[in-house]
Image: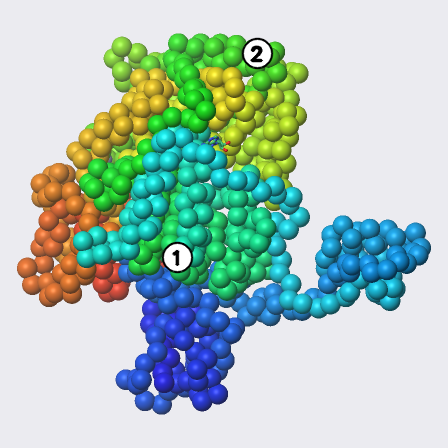
Amino acid sequence: MIARVSLEIALRKEFDYSIPPGLAGQIEVGSRVQVPFRSRKIYGTVTALAEESAHAELKPVLKVIGAQTLVTPKVLKLARWIADYYCCAPEIALKSVLPEAVRKKKETEAGWKKQLFVRALMASGKFPKLTPRQQEVWNIIEERREILLTELLELAETTAATIRKLEDRGLVEIASQISERDPYAREQILPTQPLPLNPAQAAALEKIKAAMDTPPSTLNPQPSTFLLHGVTGSGKTEVYLQALAHALEQDQGAIVLVPEISLTPQTVERFKARFSSGKLQTLVAVLHSHLSAGERHDEWHKIRQGRARIVIGARSAIFAPVEPLGLIIVDEEHEHTYKQEEAPRYHARDVAIMRGRMENAVVVLGSATPSLESYYNCKKGKYTLLELPERVDNQKMPHVRVVDMRQATKEKGPPIFSPQLKEAITQRLERGEQTILFLNRRGYSTALQCPKCGYVATCPNCSLALTYHRPEQKLRCHICGFADAVPAACPNAKCKNPAIRYAGLGTQKVEETLAKLFPNARVRRMDADTMKRKDDYRKTLGDFRVGKTDILVGTQMIAKGLHFPNVTLVGIIYADLALHQPDFRAGERTFQLLTQVAGRAGRGDVEGEVFVQAFAPFHPAIQYARRHDFTGFYEQEIEFREQLKYPPVSRVALLTLKGRNEDKVKFSAEHLKRQLEKNLGSAPASGVVVSAPADDTELFGEGAKQSARDARAPQTKRGQNLFSDLIIAGPAPAPLLRAESYYRYQIMLRTCAMSKLSQTLAKIIETLVLPEDVTLSVDIDPVNLG
Ligand code: ADP
Ligand code: ZN
């Protein structure tokens, strides 16, 4: 037998090795192996087994790592799809489906080393007389029933000799056994029972359960994908929990994806509490980036061996080896953190849907503010829409007031707090209620906006905010390359304000100003600068929960999933900030952010109030968020996407060239553009709007197979218009043209036939010659255009 191995070094190739008799029967698809390569020994993953090889004189596999395959053949297939669709090398895709800690052999051994346990025995007969010291130690053991020897020694500040004495008295047993590190072992979690559902929840659950009970048939070959659109506080999580219970009843496993920032102890506990009681002890495994390598390793093995049937985790948990997989839940499916920003640049939500297809698992996407992509797929009949239009217990949605900051602006510029917000904070402090203040200071707020009239400079070709480049005093569109001089005064004829530049503002400034305005208020700040240590997040939220903090100031870190009944006021300091990012999703992000942040208010008995401070108060994203009107927002936003062929109407591939020498980068970008035009053909010169009907069956439908066939067909149509709807925009400098002394230029491609484009791009890139110090990255379905 021959093993085909993908090596851990980037070669974009697989190699054949012979399986020596000693290893026969131990190697299967997915096995981790060590093989000789040149003069080195290298790790790799077996991707296929074959009877014979095209090569003679094969070297043998040296070793198999671990008794069990670490990648299931199904996940392996998923990795291949990722490599194809996201245009990256297979070994890179493979690396990402296996956590580092599991890949490394050393960890494997360390993780399974035998450890000594101390266990309390039933005291039969008379309880022996103990010294006070022994008694102390015994008390700890009795309370814990079973404890790691090393942990006990530390806890009781004692020696092994003392424990031996207890053993001699027949009180304890010291035994070795395989131990596992459970990162949540010290938590006291109270079990919860399923809640009686309200009618909307019950209807949603029924549909999900029915889909799980229906095996795919010729009539209905694909498993179902649902979009659970429920306003904040509508009880989506309870629906997930009961759907998970249904999967377990059917002996199936499940994966729950949540954004990394939502993976708080609060969230994890809700899942553990439902499924960790009684004999279901180890049912829930948790995977996230704060686990130690050892913990991650153990959680992973629990899953692989089928002891944990539910996995909850961030992005990469989608690769967890759950088998059989019955259900995948993607909570907050609109979250952009599901997209990995380094190769392989996969989107976990889309990978989830693909995995569901491959393994016949039902997929439930949930959000209060669905992505346009998912909602569009519902409209097209690909996903089934489930709605929870009201908060549980008939809590009202918070009252949202938009404050026009142009009116609050004085001679010396706009204030941080409008009089209205200041007054509202004062009231809350008097009443002993809590306030959350939100400022999304992330990124580079370099759009040019007039603080007096709200005017923002936009690109005449792309309808996107122009980026302000300070050194050259230019406004640039990074999609098409349009450039303009910075106006000396506001171009709005009715305004002409000479102080048009926006001065920066951050959470720290907000905190400082609060201290001046409300010297007695207890204020805490939560952003990347203050949340450095593992425990900071938890501690700050803990203090807020128990009322040790009056006002919590933060970035998007505090926008999601928090549930604090005593928060009756939410203030959004500068709502326009997200609006004028040079990104076609700027409006969508603003709507999502405002809706999510507003959702933090009024989760208790008192109705919540939200103040949105904005210089463009009548922008649709702000107005629809004010009215809690998702569909209204969707309808107007999709029109804009349709006009300019932005997703979800088409798909985007973003090519970025990067290097230290700007001329070289620019030249390379132009060279690449010519290659693309030659090989792909492009839409008519206007560059915009082609009549081809929007159809994205590509990724998730039968179209995928069809297009794969097309791409393999000889391309003899005079090399032109392979893609009838293709738009090639750029090259243009990236919004953040120079980051860490690198210059970056981008080309944006838009088409509906993305699988086909990815494959063609891979071929073009293979033959593309670039200067040595210029690198190219490909981002399929990018979410961050920076
Ligand atoms: P969402 O995830 O939609 O924001 P949650 O699932 O967090 O909403 O629900 C909000 C609160 O309502 C939670 O405290 C939850 O326990 C409670 N809840 C959910 N469903 C019900 C129900 N059917 N009856 C009573 N309380 C419920
Ligand atoms: Zn433009």
Q: Is residue 23 above or below residue 548?
A: below
Give the amino acid type for the residue marked by disc 1 in the picture.
Leu
Instruction: Return the residue nearer the eye: 483 or 63.
Output: 63
**Whole-percent x, y for residue 340 in the image:** 40, 50
Q: Residue at x 21, y 42 (%)?
A: 381
Instruction: Return the residue nearer the eye: 490 or 165.
Output: 165
Q: Residues within 10 Å of mark 2 (few under 14, many from 20)?
A: some
* Marker disc for residue 314: none
Instruction: Return the residue nearer the eye: 120 or 380.
Output: 120
Q: Residue at x 27, y 15 (%)?
A: 492
Instruction: Report the quarter where the C terminus lies.
Output: top left
Q: CA distance from mark 1 to mark 2?
A: 52 Å
Give the amino acid type for the residue marked by disc 2 in the picture.
Thr
**Whole-percent x, y for residue 422 in the image:** 52, 12
Q: Residue furthest front?
A: 125
Q: Residue furthest left?
A: 717
* Marker disc for residue 325: 1
Q: Is residue 459 above or below residue 404?
A: below
Q: Is residue 753 visible?
A: yes
**Whole-percent x, y for residue 335 in the image:** 39, 40
* Marker disc for residue 426: 2
Q: Residue at x 92, y 56 (%)?
A: 130
Label 2 sits on a secondary structure element that is helix
Q: Residue at x 61, y 16 (%)?
A: 432
